[in-house]
Image (cartoon, helix red, strand yellow):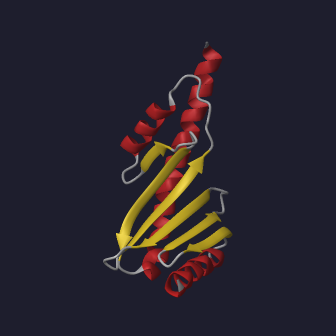
């Protein structure tokens, strides 16, 4: 637990040091860490970190969107479109019907995540902008009817 707690504290410090807000941090048991934080453009990210038995660390960075009503486009079609346009992003609907955009991977050194997180965040921000654009286009189609 102490090791994961130190990792989560280091990541929290890095987030604060980059003018972002830590919304929540949590260590669950000995091997699971969780961080929720908001970027400058107010996107809310969640970072899950799990220590595997082989010493690797699994990480998943995600952005959640509450169910967006798209009258002209099914949510599944939108998510499929996003994953075809933005490499490395996984998009799906969770059990509550919220849209989830995420990227994940493994690392030997979780202290190296601050070097990778800016790029991962940028990819998710790009995918989020595509959702916003799609939402606007859907609304325009609705107005034409």
Could you say which quadrant of the image residue 8 lies in? bottom right
- Residue at (56, 61) in percent of width and height: 46
When the figure is inspected, residue 8 is found, relative to residue 117, above or below; the finding is below
Q: Quadrant for the C terminus, please.
A: top right
Q: Residue at 52% across / 82% down in the picture?
A: 7
In this rendering, is residue 83 above or below 58?
Answer: above
State the residue in front, 100 or 55: 55
Q: Residue at x 47, y 54 (%)?
A: 102
- Name which quarter of the figure residue 55 lies in: bottom left
Q: Position of residue 4 (x, y in %)?
A: 51, 81
Q: Position of residue 36 (x, y in %)?
A: 62, 65
Residue 123, given in percent of the width and then of the height, sits at: 46, 56
* Horizontal side of residue 103 vs 137, given as left or right: left
**67 and 5: which one is in front?**
5
Across and down, in percent, residue 16 comes to 65, 76
Identify which residue is drawn at 64% across, 79% down.
Answer: 17
Left or right of 86 on screen, residue 97: right
Which residue sits furthest top?
A: 145
Q: How many marks?
A: 0
Q: Is residue 115 above or below residue 6?
A: above
Please identify the residue farthest to the left as the structure is shown: 54
Between residues 38 and 25, which one lies in front from this camera angle? 25
């Amino acid at each position: 637990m102490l090791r994961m707690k130190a990792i989560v504290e280091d990541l929290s410090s890095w987030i604060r040091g980059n003018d972002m807000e830590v919304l929540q941090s949590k260590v669950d048991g000995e091997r699971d860490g969780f961080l929720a934080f908001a970027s400058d453009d107010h996107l809310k990210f969640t970072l899950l970190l799990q220590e595997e038995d082989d010493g690797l660390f699994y990480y998943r960075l995600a952005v959640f969107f509450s169910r967006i009503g798209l009258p002209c486009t099914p949510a599944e079609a939108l998510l499929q479109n996003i994953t075809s346009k933005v490499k490395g992003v996984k998009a799906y609907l969770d059990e509550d019907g919220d849209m989830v955009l995420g990227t994940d991977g493994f690392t030997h050194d979780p202290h190296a995540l601050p070097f990778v997180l800016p790029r991962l965040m940028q990819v998710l921000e790009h995918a989020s902008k595509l959702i916003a654009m799609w939402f606007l286009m859907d609304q325009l189609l609705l107005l034409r009817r």
